[in-house]
Amino acid sequence: MHRGQMGRRLPLKTVYYLSFLFFIVIPILIVLVVALFVLNKQFKNQALTNIRQAQETVITELKSDIDIMSMRLSHLIYTNNNEILAYAAEMDTADFGRRYEYEQKLQQAGNLALEPVKDIISVGFYMKDGRKTYIKNDINRTMDEIREMDWYQKALEKSNTVCLGSYDTVSSSDLYVGGKKDLLILVFALAPDVSTDRSQKIEMVVFYQSTDAADRIKEYNRNYLEGKNKLGITQIRDSGGNLVFSTLDQGEIDFSGKKYTCVKTPLELKDTVWYLESYIETRDLTLEYWNRAVLVLLAAVLILLLAGYYSRYFLRSIVNPVEEISSGLREVEEGNLDVHVTASGQSEVRNMIHQFNAMVRRLKALIGEYEERVRNMERKPGDYLAALLKKEMTPEEVGQSSRDFFMEPYVLMSMHIVYENPAENEMDVAVRLKNSFERNPRYASRCIAYIENSSFFFAFYRVTEEEYSSRIVKMLQELQRAAANEFGVKIEVCIGKKAFGFEEFPKSEEDVRKKICLRHLIGENAVIDLNRAEEKDDSLLELAKEYERLANALYIADEKNMAEEKNKLFVAFSDLPMAEIRGRAYAVILAIGKRFDRDNSRFSDAFGQQYNYLDKIGRIEDVRSLKLWLTNYFAWLMDYSASKLNVAEADVIVRAKRYMADHYEDCDLSLPKVAEHVGLNEKYFTNRFTKETGENFSSYLTALRMQKAKELLKTTTFKVYEISEMVGYHNVEHFNRMFKKLNGITPARYRKTM
């Protein structure tokens, strides 16, 4: 109580400033400081995330090089019944002529096997008697130096097993003549046993390959030292802490101490672990953030100063003169329009009070006039229909407001307008089209219409006779002819069931909205009467939901999913009577039409005209002919979608699928290449691809290739190894394993069953 009395005794200005300080200034500063601290953490974490993503890119390149070159080494050794090893073994002789002869054969066979791999530096063959032979470039290391390497010893311990090593070139021509400084040379060694090298002369076969990962690390490091990125200095160490690769001279930068932050990512190899280490000055992680934070703090202080100055001005110049008017406003708020404020104060204040009193008197008069106008105003039937369809009024409210609206039975119709020659302002054409309906006598006497949008109308038809159905159809046909002649548009209509009262209006509206899509099956100037075969229509709409995935695949030209869904459709035909098979074909067409509707695309544009699919499919008498017709139909749609769909502006996953469908035969097609094509980071792309397609990139690509292989096996006479290469597999054994894993049988067996 004592504190409240003190507050009331304080001057209003003092209370105002204290409140401004504790309730505005201090909370703003606290929120600002906390927000800056949180943002600092986020900036730092984002910087670390960027470094890890850069490291993942390097790791991906290294893994790819290691996996590919390991396979190439095995291929080089085992190809053509160990031909290259045999040539190399024959060179282990003192006979110069014989050595020269087999050196030429070895070079020729080796160069042929190594093409077109430009990153291979050399292939070395090391004999047990100390001799050595190279393909491409000679290695500047003695036999003793090479034999002392860990990877050489590991390969001797594990015959016929590829072992990995590396060299970091410290100067030009360090490892071979013409080599650059700071190259990371990957070494792949294999010691052949007697089953591989029957001569038992060759002790070791070694691949020397440069990797683009070194160039990427050099670029990262150079740009960091030049201030162009915040990725730090990156280098590679093995599990023992030994430096595998670095672009810095020894001792050039000391990374010890708290000055640098280290981000380390492991690279797990077959027989060892390497670590990518990125050292970045700790202050670089948040330097840019704090530079901006200072500006934000200065701006916040300036805003607070301006707010304080304005609040003082407001208190001094406005609050007190308006106090009397504020009291009068509270009276008006409570509904008292008889309030009158006595003029007082300076002339400006007195003028304000006079204006307030005049405003109250005018407001009282306006409210009276408005209430009188509302009492006398009546809505037209068209206004009630618009209010119903826009959900501004419920059917029950309309029934209460206008007893005549639902007095008679009615039929609700939906109309889809097709503009053959789209105008710049289709809504203007729609309004003129609706007005032209009034020239039809039956429409003018029984119908009201509502334009939901330029392509969709509703019509409310009052039923006044027993034989109303045929007369509605005749009226609609007259409207269709008039609209085509005068405006060049086509009208497709769905006639709802006869209804009565406001209770049946929502169901009637739902029916004509949902079933207008049946126009896709009927063709040009379709008139759908729901009073006929309603149960069949409902089952057809429900069945169409099963083929939404097929329709979507056709719309975006997704070959893989289209082929899968088409096979499911044809399998479903197996045990069904012809009538039900036709029903499923109708459902597929309906699903495709609805997919076009979803993007406001015209289904008829795919074929240049509208077809009556009920008649077209109804004339097909056997399952085989219907399958052939659907196959050709899908192929046409796929070609249309691929050529007309603006893939450059479509979803990136659609673009990725199209790219994979166009390049599946490329054995080097990989996730990094597809991610680069659609312009996304590899990690983000693979996460998004898996989330949106329900399967990872590798599974999708494998399924696509196997789908193509099955088509070739069924429709061509190519050999299995030829088909393997045609779908992106150079190794036919790997192709056979993958085909059997996915299909349960070998390719040859599959061809026989077909």
Image (tube, helix red, strand yellow):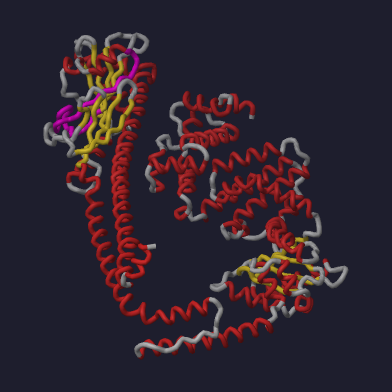
Residue 681 picture quarter? top left
Image x and y of residue 176, in percent: 17, 28
> Of helix, strand and loop, which mostly describes the magenta segment?
loop
With 9 as the anchor, is 520 left or right in this view?
right
Q: Is residue 163 magenta?
A: yes
In the displayed image of the protein, which residue is found farthest to the front?
2
In the displayed image of the protein, which residue is found farthest to the right?
466
With 416 as the anchor, is 73 left or right in this view?
left
> Which residue occupies 21% across, 42% down?
282
Image x and y of residue 125, in percent: 25, 18
Against 433, is 518 above or below?
above
With 4 as the anchor, is 720 left or right in this view?
right
Residue 528 picture quarter? bottom right
Which image quarter is the C terminus in? top right
Of the pair 635 and 392, the residue shown nearer to us: 392
Against 286, is 612 above or below?
below
Q: Is residue 482 magenta?
A: no
- Residue 419 visible somewhere in the drawing: no
Image x and y of residue 556, in percent: 54, 50
Which image quarter is the N terminus in? bottom left
> Which residue occupies 72% across, 66% down?
395
Image x and y of residue 682, in percent: 38, 41
With 601 as the anchor, is 162 left or right in this view?
left
In the displayed image of the protein, which residue is found farthest to the left?
251
The residues colored magenta run 158-185
Against 241, is 427 above or below?
below
